Structure formats: structure tokens, C-alpha cells
Image (cartoon, helix red, strand yellow):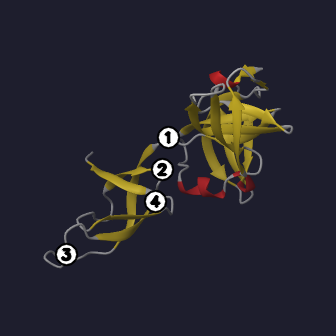
Amino acid sequence: MIRGGDINKGTVLLIKNAPYLVVEREFVNPGKGSAFARVKMKNLKDGSVLTQTIKTPDMVEDAVVETVDAQYQYSDGENFVFMNNTTFDTINVPYTLNDTLQYYLKEGESYPVVIWEEEPIDVKIPPKMVFIVAESENYIKGDTVSGATKPIVTETGLTVRVPLFIKQDEKIMVNTETNEYVERVNN
């Protein structure tokens, strides 16, 4: 059990027998009455979002989750297949959990996999990742307007809008939460 005032972003709560990840937390201390936390949570099983107000002294059940470091191996069409870096066991993460993972997973890279009741429920993607530009159209210099962008496709299939000077085979950093270009990465 966890006190309402101790809930933070990243905490996993058990609500209606389902694990919910706290994605936003706002602490409110009104002039009258007791303080409370307004939390926005994502169901780690089906992806639904729930917003709830929890009074600071109230107790809420927290879910016991385990995070294991696992190396992404391949996709078999139905699952993303990982190998636990400690036990070398295979972890199958179903596509239905998060089909956008395909754009961020790179073979041979390690990612934290969240497990609840011996089932994978989430794969944590870093907030920023480096990708290689696989497809890019060339634009003529002088053909630009200030701040002009073009779409490119990374080696994983992710489409990102980048400045016109970015060329094929260059490395770029992308914000994985917004899918926005951050900067060009020099080797």
C-alpha cells in the first residue's frame, strides 16, 4: 500500500485488478480541505487512460512489478522477442501491447521490460534515441523557407520531419515521446 501523497510519476498502482502506470501527477493543496493528488494513469494491459483524484492521506494499492534488462532479438510477426540479460530466458512481448514499439526497437539493443505476474506489460523506450536516415529526398539549396522541413524514414521505419539539410545515411536524434527531430548526430 502507498499513501496518496507519495504517488509519483512512474509509480505503478493496482486498480480494479489491473496495473496502471502514473504518467502525470499534480499535487493540489487548496486553502480549505485536505490536499490531494490528481493523477493520470495508463493501463499497462490495454492502454486505456484513467484520471483519478486521490486524497493525500488515503492508501492506494501499488502493483508489484519487476523490471528486467533484456536484449531485443527479433520480431516473429506476433511478438517482439527479447532475451533476459541475466537468465538468458526468452521474453515474448505481444504486438497488441504496443504496436508502435516496432519503430523504436533495434536488434541487439537492451531495453528495460516491465513484468507483472510473470507477464510482460511494458517496454521502456529511452526519451531520446539515435536513428540512421534510411530514406530522404534531396532538396535544392535556396529552395527553402526559414524552418522548412521534409519527411524522412529511419532504419526502423519511423517517419520523422527534419530540416532540409539532413541527408540519407546521416544519424539524427529523435525525441521518442513526440517523434520530433532533436539534432544531427556526428559520428
Precedes in sequence: disc 4 or disc 1: 1
The kind of residue on which mark 3 rests is Thr
Q: Mark 2 highlights which residue? A: 176
CB contact under 8 Å: marks 1 and 2: yes
Q: Are marks 4 and 2 in contact (CB under 8 Å)?
A: no
Residue 76 drawn above or below residue 25: below
Q: Say if 170 sits above or below 152 in the image.
A: above
- Binning the other alpha carbons within 10 Å of mark 1 as few (below 14), some (14 to 19) or many (20 upward) gives few
Residue type at the position of mark 1: Pro
Q: Quadrant of residue 134?
A: bottom left
Choose between 74 and 29: the one closer to the eye: 29
Residue 109 in the image, given as x and y percentages of width and height? 53, 40
Q: In this view of the protein, which residue sits in the foreground, 132 or 2?
A: 2
The residue pinned by badge 3 equals 144
Instruction: Tell me residue 111's x, y (percent).
Output: 57, 37
Residue carrying label 4? 155
Q: Secondary structure at mark 2?
A: loop
Spatial distance from mark 2 to mark 3, Cα to Cα?
27 Å
